[in-house]
Each structure stands twice: as C-alpha cells, then as structure tokens.
Amino acid sequence: MEGRIVPRSRDEFMAAIKAFSEGTGDGMKDVFLEQAALCCRDSMVFTPPIVKAGGDGMSKEAKLAGELAVQKDVKSVMVGERSGSTRARRGRLFRKLGSASFTNNPAKFWKLASDNSDLFAGNGLWSRMFGNGFGTQKGFNKLKNYFGKIGQEEASNIFNRPIVESREQVRQIHETFKKRFGGRIVKNGGPGIDFWQRTVVKDNVLEDYIRERMRMVGRIKAGWVDALNKLPKPKNLSGPASRKNAGRSQIPLWIKRHAKSEGYAVMSTRQVGELIIELTVGNRIGDTDFVATDADTKNLVYGNRVKQMPLMLENMLKAQREKFNRGKR
C-alpha cells in the first residue's frame, strides 16, 4: 500500500545514510546529525498516541486519541456519582434499591427512588413504583420481592462502600489498576469488572482527575524533544538552508510543554584509518508501559528514514536541475 512504512533494521538505516552521504556529497558527520534529528522527530510521530490509521502522532487527532484513551481507562474502573447513560445509571440505581430492599431499609429505598425519579420515566416500573403507595411501608412491601432478588448478592458488600471524594483516592485506585494491566487498562484486556462494580466517585472530583491526566498526553513523546535540543546542529550541508534545522520546527505545544530532561544525545568521533562516528540519542521515558515496544517505534523510525532519504536526494537534485535550467534562460 502506498505510504506504508516498512520497519527496517539499524544496518539498513546505516546503509541508507552512507548512500545518502555519497549522493549529496555531504560529510558523514553532518548527515548523521541531520538524520538523528529527523529520527527524534519520527520517534514523536510513531510513539503513541497516534491516529487509528497509524502514524501522524503529532497531529490534533493524535492528541485527541490520547485524551480519549485516558478517559476510557479511568472510567473503566470508576464512575461518577450521577454520570453515564440513562441505562447505566438505572442499572446502578436498581442494584442500590436491591441492596436497600434486601436489608429491609425502606427509608433508604424511598430516598434513592425519590432522588432519582427521572430514571423511572419510560420504564415499566414507573406505575409499580409510583402507583403502589410511593414512600409507604405498604408500597415497599409490594416491591420488596422484585428488588430483593437484585440485591441478594450485592447487598452485603458492593454498595456499602462510601463514595470517593478526594482526587488522591481516585489516583490510587487508577494506579492500582494501571499496575495490574501494564499501564494501559482497556488496551491490555482490563479491567474485568462489571459496570456496577466500578468505584463511585463524586462527579466533579472524577472529571477534575480526568482533565489532569489528559493534560499529561504527549509527555512520553516529549523526551525526544529534549534529545533533539541536545543534538549539535550540522554545519556544512548542501541544498536548502533549512536542512540544518531538520526536525526542529513546528513541534506542537501539547508535546513540547512536557520537555524536561528525559532525553539525551551523546556523540563521539575518532580516527582509525577512517572517521568513526558514534552517536546515541534516546528518551528515558520513551518506552513507558512498553508503548514504543508494542508500536515497534524504533524499526518504524528506521524504516521511515530509509524511505525518506532517497526522496530527499531526489528533491535536492530536482531543485539543482531547475536552478541550472533557469540560469540558462
């Protein structure tokens, strides 16, 4: 398929660099630095979050995909006190009513029903709830058999838990499930619990926590910004002047704002008959929860560079031809 990136090995990448250096006439050191910078940028592109079709990991769509994944993970283990679809909220309510019925607590039963009367609209239980002595012991006795069955298994445990009211408690619950499922709950098959088993959290507390986690989207990519900033710029490249800034322009703020000190770039040269260049660039948090390993980021980056270098050379030669032809006119 056109546009597909074929993963490549380090050896294939090095062979492409050598061919590119020979084709452009540029020194290996400068080509190394240019391609290392572009590798850093490609690493941002291919490190999750990415768009569903693959790649494009510096786009607004990739940011949105990351934010939605965060929201989905958090809400797979916790639920807002009154959030969710009508059907889901009704399911939670019926189980709570079941708990109250099973434990013979009419006061709790009718308070729950009264506080959530909107959930009975359009439901077959409307007449049974509101036409049988709503709020009375007689009405409770008529409904007890129905709701008692629902609450039989859950009454003694699930719904006696208090509603979570602090962001720190939410964080601890989230982190517990993240560790259990390798950092990515839903993607790795979690959480393995039913909707009614999810921890109930005050709505504003849960939404504040989700917003806080969503602001962290882009952090794993940002280590490559730091590595890029630590790379020396090439000095003697042919072609357009923009090549010396390769990879450094138009990095979106949602990635760049997280750049701290997680990236590194180490370069050394020595002469042993021929010039030997050793260059290592990396991102200390780039494989958090194995996101880069699972996405095969490294080999995709090599593959994209192997694909792009001949295209870069072709464009440079084309520009030279056009410049030459204009000079002859």
Image (cartoon, rainbow, N blue to C red):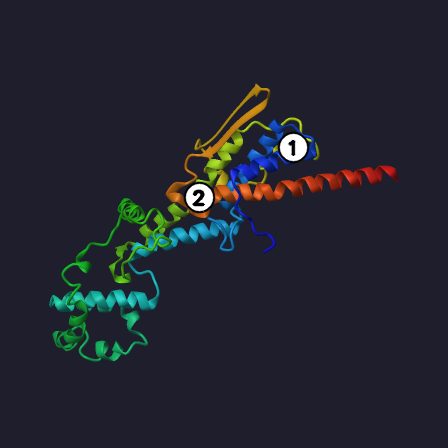
Between 125 and 61, the one nearer to me in the picture: 61
Circle 2 — which element? helix
Give the residue at x 39% y 51%: 70
Quadrant location of residue 317?
top right
Height in image: 46 above or below 231? below
Q: Residues within 10 Å of mark 1 (few under 14, many from 20)?
A: many
Point out the tag, 1 or 2, that comes first from the N-terminus. Answer: 1
Give the x, y percent position of residue 174. Answer: 30, 48
**What is the quadrant of the C terminus in the image?**
top right
Q: Which residue is mark 2?
A: 292
Residue type of the residue flagged with mark 2: Ala
**Distance from label 1 to label 2 (Cα)?**
29 Å
Tell me which residue sits at (33%, 60%) in the image: 83
Q: Secondary structure at mark 1?
A: helix
Q: Where is residue 228 drawn, in percent x and y?
A: 53, 33
Left of 253 or right of it: where is 294?
left
Q: Residue at image x 27%, y 59%? A: 193
Q: Position of residue 154 (x, y in %)?
A: 17, 63
Q: Residue at x 26, y 55 (%)?
A: 199
Query: Could you tell me residue 159's position as x and y percent?
Result: 19, 60
Instruction: Please determine whether, in this image, residue 111 is positioned above or below residue 261.
Output: below
The residue beneath circle 1 is 21
